[in-house]
Image: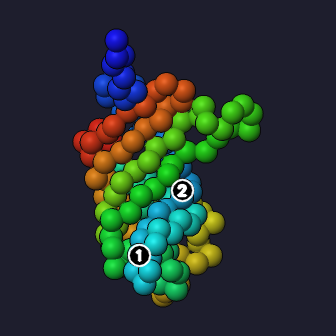
Amino acid sequence: MTERQQDPIRPTDDEARALARDLITEARFAALGVTDPETGAPMVTRIALVPGPDGAPLTLISTLSAHTAALAAHPACSLLIGEPAARGDPLTHPRLTLHARAEPADKAALRDHYLSLYPKATLYYDFGDFGLTRFAPVAGFLNGGFGKAYRLSPADLMP
């Protein structure tokens, strides 16, 4: 007799939505995955991150960075948000993979908001080669810990 394989993805519930939103709200950095426009290869880098007023993540990045060129060529990207705690198995701690579309954000209008959450950026926020990018959620995959996997829609991710 053949056993049916059980889907490991749980139905999305309010607890999963709240955890995903909390991860975005509390994050001050993330891993950003982009596609290298010259080679088509995936590239991952670490970026600073804050939640925007609407809940979508924002980052301040230099036009000199390779990931800025990659996002300009291919705005589809992925963020890995969530860090393991100091103790325990890192794979049991919550993390969110956010599929997003990178889009320019109004750097001047969001200056006070961004710096209130990431004050260290005061040193370079006003540099001319830095731009503000908003990550518009397309989909999410939440691993809330062992045995707690969820697929999330943009509506699930935004407050």
Quadrant of the drawing holding the C terminus: top left
Which residue corresponds to mark 1? Answer: 40
Give the residue type that dot 1 points to: Gly
Q: Residues within 10 Å of mark 1 (few under 14, many from 20)?
A: few
Please tell me whether mark 2 or mark 1 is closer to you in this view: 1
Residue 130 on image: x %, y %: 48, 80
Q: Is residue 33 above or below residue 147?
A: below
Quarter assignment of residue 85: top right
Near-viewer residue (139 or 26): 139
Quadrant of the drawing holding the N terminus: top left
Q: Spot the residue most to the top.
A: 1
Which residue corresponds to mark 2? Answer: 30
Residue 4 disc label: none
Which residue lies at the image location 42% right of the left edge and 71% below the top edge? 35
Residue 12 horizontal side relative to residue 148, left or right: left
Near-viewer residue (108 or 85): 85
Which residue lies at the image location 59% right of the left edge and 72% below the top edge? 122
Which residue lies at the image location 28% right of the left edge and 53% below the top edge? 138
Residue 55 on image: x %, y %: 36, 49
Quarter assignment of residue 91: top right
Quarter assignment of residue 86: top right
